[in-house]
Image (spheres, grey):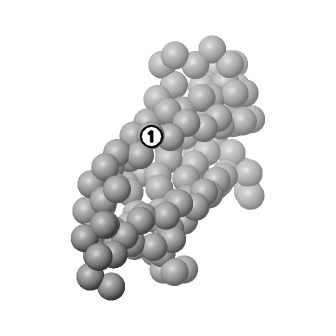
């Protein structure tokens, strides 16, 4: 899994917008292992070119997993920053966990 691409899809609900301006969103990922941050992607603008309903913004992309991942349990957090929202409504997160299995060579030596 290290170096592989992880494909994800999500929906951003109720982003701030008005009749003259679409939402202004950026997203990034934070990867944790054993409660420690091991990777953080750069924030990137959310592509709104094909969005027909700004209340429901689908996003889909690939994240290349860092080459340095060791076997074990991980938590991946998607962070979306709504630059037009105010207060606590400006940040949304979603997490999911996954496991990087030990390679068969490592298991044979144990």
Task: List x then y, in percent, for residue 21.
Answer: 60, 24
Residue situated in front as seen by the camera: 85 or 34: 34
Task: Give the quarter of the image for residue 83.
Answer: top right
Identity of the residue drawn at 51% across and 80% down: 34
Is 86 drawn above or below residue 58 in the view shown? Answer: below
Task: Give the quarter of the image for residue 24.
Answer: top right
Residue situated in front as seen by the camera: 45 or 64: 64
In the rendered image, the quadrant that contains the C terminus is bottom left
Task: List x then y, in percent, for residue 68.
Answer: 27, 69
Q: Is residue 6 visible?
A: yes
In the rendered image, the quadrant that contains the N terminus is bottom left
Task: Give the quarter of the image for residue 79.
Answer: bottom right
- In this rendering, the count of numbered labels is 1
Is 63 drawn above or below residue 39 in the view shown? Answer: above
Tag 1, which secondary structure?
Answer: strand
Identity of the residue drawn at 64% across and 35% down: 11
Q: Is residue 64 left or right of residue 59?
A: left
Q: Residues within 10 Å of mark 1 (few under 14, many from 20)?
A: few
Identity of the residue drawn at 54% across and 80% down: 35
Is 54 drawn above or below residue 27 in the view shown? Answer: above
Which residue is most to the bottom? 110
Q: Is residue 24 visible?
A: no
Q: Is residue 51 left or right of residue 42?
A: right
Task: List x then y, in percent, for residue 51.
Answer: 58, 19
Residue situated in front as seen by the camera: 3 or 109: 109
- The residue tagged 1 is 7
Task: List x then y, in percent, for residue 72.
Answer: 45, 73
Identity of the residue drawn at 53% across and 60% down: 98
């Amino acid at each position: 899994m290290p170096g592989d691409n992880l494909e994800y899809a999500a929906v951003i609900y109720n982003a701030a917008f008005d009749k003259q301006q679409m939402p202004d969103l950026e997203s990034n990922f934070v990867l944790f292992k054993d409660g420690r941050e091991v990777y953080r992607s750069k924030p990137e603008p959310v592509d709104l070119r094909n969005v027909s309903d700004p209340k429901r913004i689908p996003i889909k992309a690939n994240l290349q997993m860092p080459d340095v991942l060791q076997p074990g349990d991980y938590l991946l957090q998607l962070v979306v920053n709504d630059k037009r929202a105010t207060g606590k409504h400006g940040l949304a997160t979603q997490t999911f966990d996954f496991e990087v299995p030990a390679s068969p060579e490592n298991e044979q030596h144990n």
